[in-house]
Amino acid sequence: MQLTQEEQDILDGRQGETLAKVMRTLVEYGDTFGAERMVKVTAPGHLVTSFGISIMGAVFRVMDELVEAGLHTKEPFTVDPRPIDNADVPANLIQKIVGNITYGNQESYEKQLRAVGLKDENAFTCACYLPEVGNTPKRGDILSWAESSAVVYANSVLGARCNRNSAFIDLFGNILGEVPEFGFLTDEGRKATWVVDVRCEHRPEAQVLGSAIGMKVMEEVPYIKGLAPWLGGRLDDSARAYLKDMGAATASNGAVGLYHVEGITPEAADLGEDLIAEGAKTYVIDDAELERVKASYPNIWKNPDAKPRLAFIGCPHCTLDQLKDWTYRLRKACDDAGEKRVRVPTVVSSAPDVLAEFAKYPEHELLLSTGATLTYICPLMYMDNPMTNLPVITCSNKLRTYTSARYFDEGDLLAIIARGTI
């Protein structure tokens, strides 16, 4: 890499040994991927590592070194969700004890996060870009993020530029205020190498469509045709929520960090098929293909025929409008089943700032009246508790991919929640 004199001075240790280590890490990262230079980070950071799990001793030691050196991010950052909410997420005594042991370093780790630049006590969410949270990059902003669902949203829906980084690469880039330029930070790296042709007769379920795309294109960039009519032809709040969930599935079921939707996402709306690279491959998705993909999901419950004991909604975190929508759908599902409350304990997850805003609306009490609860946690982290052996159901393909949770389309999930059986 070609470094400026200031960058070389940092690498040579003239601003301290610890900052030199930060620079060396980023330079070697850039060299690995063929970067020629560093570029400025132009928007606040978002960190993927939010949990004080006891086995991450190396993480805590590095954080201590950063704090002792007086290093902090150029701007306050947000971070992924907290792992535990014993007040609103069902857990027995043993689960609570094991959870508190598993994440026993949470308090001390959050103290380290505050020391290096955490935005505030509510800054824990995987959907930092939501307006209530306020970490919403602009088109063309250069980011140093790592959370896969946030990276793909920022790249695709917002038109910002960010590579799929790892934990600590995200923090180091925000401390230095620079990242190596390669991949999605370049025009060439943002071109599509797949054309996905959506030919569905029904509005495709966002989570299954994203799953199909992710498993086919893996880490490559898809240009999606035929989806715009199902999104109303414009990038409004409803379309953004749909693309949030679809993108999270592309990133977890595959490794997609950027997609373009013809006529909808910013770059596709401006550049059209000029975004498609020469020799791009084609993948046709119809209703039958989505059914095939969904049928391939395994049931890995210990007892495959068990009754569901818990349902999670909101992975990634729900938007404000999604919270309102789920409220009415939960109420209707219960009414249709002749029930006053849900038969399967149901947890709906969102960002702390979104939950605070939601509490101002009448839908808040209506949702709670169904027996569902609201939480700020990451459902995935909850299920990492070794004592959580419950048969869990969800409409999140990300949660299905990383845990034993079983996936159901939203309509099916609602019916199961209301009647208590699959």
Image: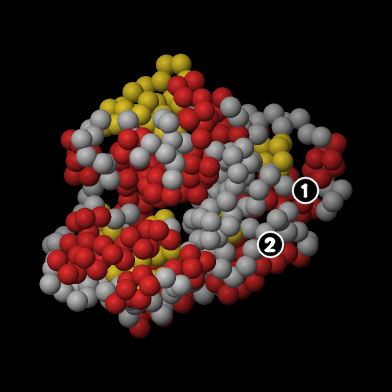
Residue 151 location in percent, x, y? Answer: 52, 45
Which amino acid type corresponds to the residue marked 2 in the rendered image? Gly
Categorize mark 2 by other alpha carbons within 10 Å: few (<14), some (14-19), many (20+): many
Position of 249 relative to 192 (above/below): below
Query: Residue at (38%, 76%) from the top-left corner?
Result: 88
Visible residue check, residue 48 = no
The image quarter in which residue 63 lies: bottom right
Q: Is residue 261 left or right of residue 345?
A: right
Q: Quadrant of the N terminus?
A: top right
Q: Quadrant of the C terminus?
A: bottom left
| Foreground residue among 335 and 410 | 335
Q: Which mark is residue 117?
A: 2
Residue 289 location in percent, x, y? Answer: 21, 35
Residue 139 location in percent, x, y? Answer: 59, 39
Q: Is residue 49 left or right of residue 44?
A: left
| Foreground residue among 31 and 361 | 361
Query: Residue at (52%, 66%) from the top-left corner?
Result: 353
Extreme-top residue of the structure? 278
Label 1 to label 2, Cα distance in Å?
19 Å
Instruction: Look at mark 1 in the image and give the residue it sits on.
Output: 20
Residue 341 location in percent, x, y? Answer: 22, 75
Visible residue check, residue 291 = yes
* Helix, strand or loop at mark 2: loop
Q: Which mark is residue 322?
A: none
